[in-house]
Amino acid sequence: MIEFIDVTFEYQSSGGSVPALRGVSTTLSPGELVTVLGPNGSGKSTLARLANGLLHPSGGRVIVENIDTGDAEHIWDIRSRVGLVFQNPDNQIVATTVVEDVAFGPENLGIDPPLMRRRVARALESVGLDGLEEREPHTLSGGQKQRLAIAGTLALDPAYLVLDEPTAMLDLQGRSDVLDVLATLRDRGTGIMHITHHLADAAAADRVLVLVAGSIVYDGVPERLLGDEDMLARCGLTVPPIGRLAAELRASGVPVPPDALTAESVVAGL
Amino acid sequence: MTLSLTGVDFTYGAGTAFATRALSDVDITFSPGEVVLVLGATGSGKSTLLRIAAGLLVPDAGSVTLDGRAVRGPLAVVRPGVGIVFQSPEMQLFAESVAADVAFGPRNQGLSEEDAIVEARRALDAVGLDPEEFGPRSPFSLSGGEARRAAIAGVLAMAPGYLMLDEPTAGLDPSGRESVRDIVTAARESAGVVVVTHDAEEFLGHADRVVLLSEGRIIFDGRTEVLVQNPGRFTEAGLRAPEVLRAQMLAQDAGVALPRFALDPTEVASLLAEAWSGPR
Ligand SMILES: Nc1ncnc2c1ncn2[C@@H]1O[C@H](COP(=O)(O)OP(=O)(O)O)[C@@H](O)[C@H]1O
Ligand SMILES: Nc1ncnc2c1ncn2[C@@H]1O[C@H](COP(=O)(O)OP(=O)(O)O)[C@@H](O)[C@H]1O
Ligand SMILES: [Mg+2]
Ligand SMILES: [Mg+2]
């Protein structure tokens, strides 16, 4: 389990200190998919970087499977257990071909070649980049690069995966492909923290966390959040058109569940 | 002032082992006052199409013409030319103040310092950033949404006859996305607007026309309403139709007889509710 215990974080900049998180407590368990929502600047990326010890809390503690991320001796342990996928995939590309890029992480960990090849192939297949093994990463389009970054992290076989807006550059199909990958990994026991701006992504989550100005304003099941318009407004979240359609159908007596945010779940009520 | 691409082919790394065909035989015409949405799966050639239309890449075959004249070189430097807002444009903000950053483009176009300042103020106003408040600030002190708007202002300050935007709302929160969408659609008052996006849902209701790209070829170019009535075209382009349209497609597949398709959730709800209760 990853535990955030009363975590505060301040960035130090020339203009003084910038509070990014104010007393955040939450957890991420194996086999759990947690969606994190919140406006720009609410502290989501900071939370992600704290999860694997890239940043250390200014106050409070972050514990990964009983190891404090502040414990310098175990930092590589923590980094190999918690895989991070960042917002901008360009900064994460290291090699000159797709397959080498994905193999870079496991190679560095000294994993033996046959196992590594299997992992790399599986990682590429699960993000739909199989067939592009020999391409130069810089020739990929934005969306393809984003999936490459996810594959690179998957190849390390982390117990937890923290993704910071991994689908920001993907089309609807690509986004849904990635969501499917996340759901599959969750079912295999990976604990997943998925930071996103898409409310609809929350419907597939076990738990939803909403950050506003560095504080958690919601931590619970998606159904309750998605069915509560006042809460959504307070969280600065907008209901997508499919959610408005679901609400209108409900109002006219069609039995559509309150957390219906996909075409399938809306049509199931008809 | 029409902007036309005729018979355009483009290959990256032509002649090398890694040659990648990005566009094939593309014919397209843009007109002032129109908002055109360019949709396509990742890798379908959307960004390449924008770069060619803006004169940043030269086609291998075919031609680009502005007002019937062949285009050579970047079109941002002419007034009124073709301005392009790249993906994550805020990464390119560089000056010590927002005002100086936005004035850079018009200065580069040969405007005097005073005229460039006037243009910069006008552009900041247009994107909803008060020039008094935001002008003197460092670009690096802006929030994600503000920085994106400042970057768009930098292009608007060049008074483009065509405004091309590559994924303008990607990575922004809902309120940031809404304000960028409003800026982009308002720009049709002074320019032809071309938006490349993977989020069809966001702009579909605001576009006059949609172009679908698939593997470097245009497979649809028509009024938004025509596409809405033929949502199968999304699938042909390797895309998913927006959820509201997909719900209607699924309902129809399940035997619900719909007289037509719609985008507006209220309208769709009444169409679906009617068809649902109707035949029984
Ligand atoms: N490197 C940094 N230096 C100074 N302030 C920062 C830095 N990174 C983020 N911040 C500030 O910390 C707050 C939280 O930022 P962040 O975690 O990136 O939010 P989000 O990911 O939700 O947009 C914001 O006010 C942001 O401006
Ligand atoms: N700089 C580049 N060098 C080589 N190939 C590229 C480059 N940019 C894009 N490509 C390739 O050209 C094709 C079209 O890419 P692009 O126009 O970026 O598509 P889109 O914007 O629709 O995702 C893709 O196959 C992509 O991999
Ligand atoms: Mg962030
Ligand atoms: Mg692109």
Image (cartoon, coloured by chain):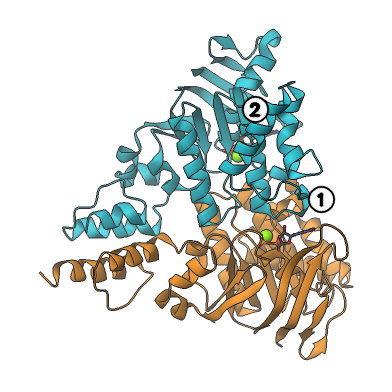
Chain colours: A cyan, B orange
- What residue is shown at x 45% (from left), y 22% (from top)? A29
Q: Amino acid at mark 1?
A: Phe
Looking at the rendered image, the quarter that the N terminus of chain B falls into is bottom right
Mark 2–mark 1 contact, CB under 8 Å? Answer: no
Decide: few, some or many residues near mark 2? Use Cα within 10 Å; few <14, some 14-19, many ≥20: many
- What residue is shown at x 70% (from left), y 37% (from top)? A102
Provide the residue designation for mark 1.
Answer: B94
The answer as to whether callout 1 falls within 8 Å of ligand 1 is: no
Q: Position of residue A37 (x, y in %)?
A: 48, 39
Please state if B142 lies on the left or on the right of B262 as rendered.
right
Provide the residue designation for mark 2.
Answer: A156
The answer as to whether callout 2 falls within 8 Å of ligand 3 is: no
- What chain does mark 1 sit on? B
Q: Position of residue B21 (x, y in %)?
A: 75, 66
Residue A102 makes an appearance in the image: yes
Picture quadrant of residue B189 = bottom right
Question: Which of the pair A234/A203 is nearer the observer?
Answer: A203
Question: Which of the pair B211/A26 is nearer the observer?
Answer: B211
Q: Amino acid at mark 2?
A: Leu
Q: Position of residue B121 (x, y in %)?
A: 72, 65
User: Residue placed farthest to the bottom in the image?
Assistant: B68
Please state if B218 lies on the left or on the right of B201 as rendered.
right
**Tag 2 secondary structure:** loop
Picture quadrant of residue A112 = top right
Please state if B271 lies on the left or on the right of A58 as rendered.
left
Ligand 3 positioned in quadrant: top right
Q: Which mark is residue B152?
A: none
**Label 2 vs label 1: CA separation?**
36 Å
Establish if B148 lies above or below A221. below
Establish if A263 lies above or below B32. above
- What chain does mark 2 sit on? A
